[in-house]
Amino acid sequence: MFVISAIILLLLAALCAKFVRMPAVPTADGAAVMAFAIFTQGVLVHFAGKGSAWTIGFAAFTLLLWLFLLTCYLGSVLDGSFKSRHWKDPVGRFAIGTWVAGTGAALTAAHLNIPQLHPVLVALGILNVGLLIFYLFGASLAAGEIAGLRLTGKLHGVILLTTVALQSVCLMLHELFGAKEYMVYRVLILLGILFYLAGVALLFLRYRRRGWNLADDWPESNCILYGAVAITGAAALKSSVFPAGVLIGIWMFALLLLLLVEGAEIVRAVLRVRRYGLRKGLGAYAPAQWSRLFTLGMFYFFGREAAKLFGDHAPGWMDVLHVWTVYGGAWIIVFLFVAQLLVWLIHFFVHSSTGRKHSS
């Protein structure tokens, strides 16, 4: 029954993409799927348990959100607007990584809580591997275009989505197929690390220059600096690629980056409120805000899954720090998730009312 329903929904999505005029959604909106998925398999599983009514409901909603965005993106391919919306800007093209990571995270959360969908999820997972290959090809072309057009001054954390996409697919494959594809996981993780090092080097070159300010030139997507490290650690932990000591070191490094990046965000928030006021400075909606929820959620997920490592291999003070981070982090993410939903709902209703006024 679950499989038949899923197939019917996929067919309806294809028909809608072909015959219904779908809204134009930003490339980075896939980050919303990423945020809902990691919230489900991280925080909700912590509070409600795997396979509970809450986690099943959120996993199902995440799949429906993913299906809606899939329909919109397919519609852009069929109506010929894909290139102008999602491909033309070489920096913005990196945001296609949210489609790969969002698909991987949504399938992982669904398989964890609705295993009856296994055949459909496996088929979609294989297609997502194809999307990953397409994305890496496009990102490689984009890197050449950025160098040729000298657009390094416009770079930000979105370029690290190559790492997030690779590690998300690694987690997805591990969930769908188990631990038997060890070499594949190792290749994906090491490739993701190489992309991360290259991306960080480019960001260093971008921000070492003068002429930028924290209020306007430090976007929310820079939180991927620690999110990419956290998802690398989670993928390595799940697939047993690195020993315990290395995994604990990755978690500590991710925590350090989190404190540095979010510390900069606090300063940035103060500067933006002073310059633009509370509503425009902090209350304005941007798709990249979902990336922060995903990165925080992934850091929490990595820490929760690594709990046994800290108890057996870490010194006492580090174990205490880890416990406080995990238990306190769950409530912080819940608060931020609700706040982000409110910001998104306000944005949605304001734009809907504005659209109705223009149409009338």
Image (tube, rainbow, N blue to C red):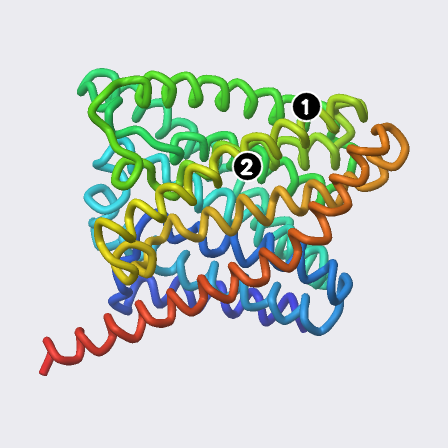
- Residue 109 drawn at (x, y percent): 64, 55
Mark sitting earlier along the chain (1/2): 1
**For this rendering, which residue is in front, 251 or 104?**
251
Amino acid at pointer 2: Leu
Please tell me how many numbered marks the rendered image carries.
Answer: 2
**For this rendering, which residue is in front, 339 or 186?**
339
CB atoms at circles 1 and 2 under 8 Å apart? no
Lateral position of residue 294 relative to residue 47, left or right: left
Lateral position of residue 343 relative to residue 55, left or right: left
Residue under label 2: 258
Which of the 4 image quarters holds residue 75?
bottom left
Which of the 4 image quarters holds residue 126?
top right
SS of the residue under disc 2: helix
> Around disc 2, counting alpha carbons within 10 Å, would you say few (fewer than 14), some (14 to 19), or many (20 or more)?
many
- Residue 43 drawn at (x, y percent): 67, 57
What is the spatial separation of the Cα atoms under label 1 and label 2, in whole angstroms? 25 Å
Residue 186 numbered tag: 1
For the view shown, which residue lies furthest in the right direction? 312
Residue occupying the point 69% across, 56% down: 111
Lateral position of residue 137 relative to residue 112, left or right: left
